[in-house]
Image (cartoon, rainbow, N blue to C red):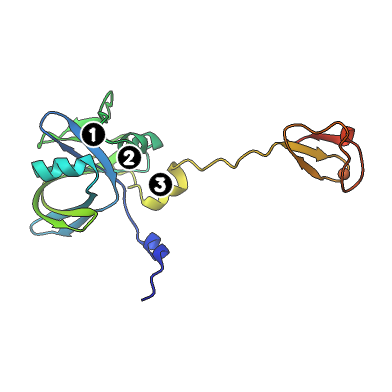
């Protein structure tokens, strides 16, 4: 069996905020697995990690909403819904970019999303770490014609790039030799061109 895991990166995905509620408080998480299954009747599926609080809420309530993120969604949306757990934070705290749908669940508004789809679960399939929820579509609306955000777009344009670590040191003005360190010893002599410390300047 030959499996190159990076082949998975060639699959194209959208990015979505998945919302659900315990009847009192709503929660949401980021998923990349929402797919239309059939047209007649209209069915979709979502696949959710069992460790997500949203998973528990959907499992119990049987309803959810999927907001399709557009390319206008900033990194803050991913931080709010993706990098914290709804078990210990209220992800909708002071969050105003949402509206309530017919199923009483919030969906992201048109600033960051181009459509939302609400579902009522008709089947749950245990996939090990995840559960595949199959649902009838109970509401769907287009908010605007902004382009849907893909996983690829997110990595290329939204996710902050790690900053390369700044090297501290001194460079020899004569030959370019770099001394690495916070402080250049006063008696330092360039090992290449033999010039003294006074011919060195701090790295920019
Ligand atoms: Fe030198």
Name the secondary structure under disc 2.
helix
Task: Report the mark closest to the observer, 3 or 1.
Answer: 1
Q: Residue furthest bottom?
A: 1
Name the secondary structure under disc 1.
loop
Q: Which residue carries the number 3 mark?
A: 154
Alpha-carbon distance for marks 3 and 1?
26 Å
Q: Which residue carries the number 1 mark?
A: 87
Q: Residues within 10 Å of mark 3 (few under 14, many from 20)?
A: some
Is the residue at mark 1 in contact range of ligand 1, meaning its CB lies under 8 Å from it? no
Q: Earlier in the sequence, mark 2 or mark 3?
A: 2
Q: Is residue 49 visible?
A: yes
| Residue at 84% from the left image edge and 36% from the top image edge | 200
Q: Which mark is residue 82?
A: 2
Look at the numbered discs 3 and 1 and tell me whether their residues touch, using CB distance below 8 Å. Answer: no
Q: Quadrant of residue 202?
A: top right
Q: Earlier in the sequence, mark 3 or mark 1?
A: 1
Ligand 1 image position (quadrant) = top right
List x then y, in percent, for residue 127: 20, 58
Task: Report the mark closest to the observer, 2 or 3.
Answer: 2
Task: Report the mark closest to the observer, 1 or 2.
Answer: 1
Alpha-carbon distance for marks 2 and 3?
13 Å
Q: Residues within 10 Å of mark 2 (few under 14, many from 20)?
A: some
Name the secondary structure under disc 3.
helix
Q: How many marks?
A: 3
Q: Nearer the viewer, residue 157 or 52?
A: 52
| Residue at 16% from the left image edge and 57% from the top image edge | 126
Q: Is residue 139 visible?
A: no
């Amino acid at each position: 069996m030959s499996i190159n895991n990076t082949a998975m990166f060639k699959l194209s995905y959208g990015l979505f905020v998945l919302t659900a509620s315990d009847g009192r408080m709503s929660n949401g998480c980021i998923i990349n697995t929402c797919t239309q299954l059939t047209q007649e009747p209209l069915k979709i599926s979502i696949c959710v990690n069992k460790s997500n609080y949203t998973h528990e809420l959907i499992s119990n309530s049987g309803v959810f909403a999927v907001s399709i993120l557009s390319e206008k969604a900033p990194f803050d949306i991913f931080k709010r819904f993706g990098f914290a757990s709804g078990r210990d934070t209220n992800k909708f705290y002071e969050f105003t970019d949402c509206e309530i749908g017919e199923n009483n669940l919030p969906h992201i508004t048109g600033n960051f999303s181009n459509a939302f789809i609400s579902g009522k679960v008709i089947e749950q399939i245990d996939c090990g770490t995840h559960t595949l929820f199959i649902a009838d579509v109970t509401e769907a609306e287009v908010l605007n014609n902004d382009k849907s955000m893909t996983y690829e777009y997110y990595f290329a344009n939204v996710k902050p790039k790690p900053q390369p670590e700044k090297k501290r040191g001194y460079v020899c003005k004569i030959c370019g030799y770099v001394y690495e360190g916070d402080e250049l010893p006063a008696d330092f002599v360039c090992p290449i061109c033999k010039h003294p410390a006074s011919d060195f300047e701090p790295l920019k």
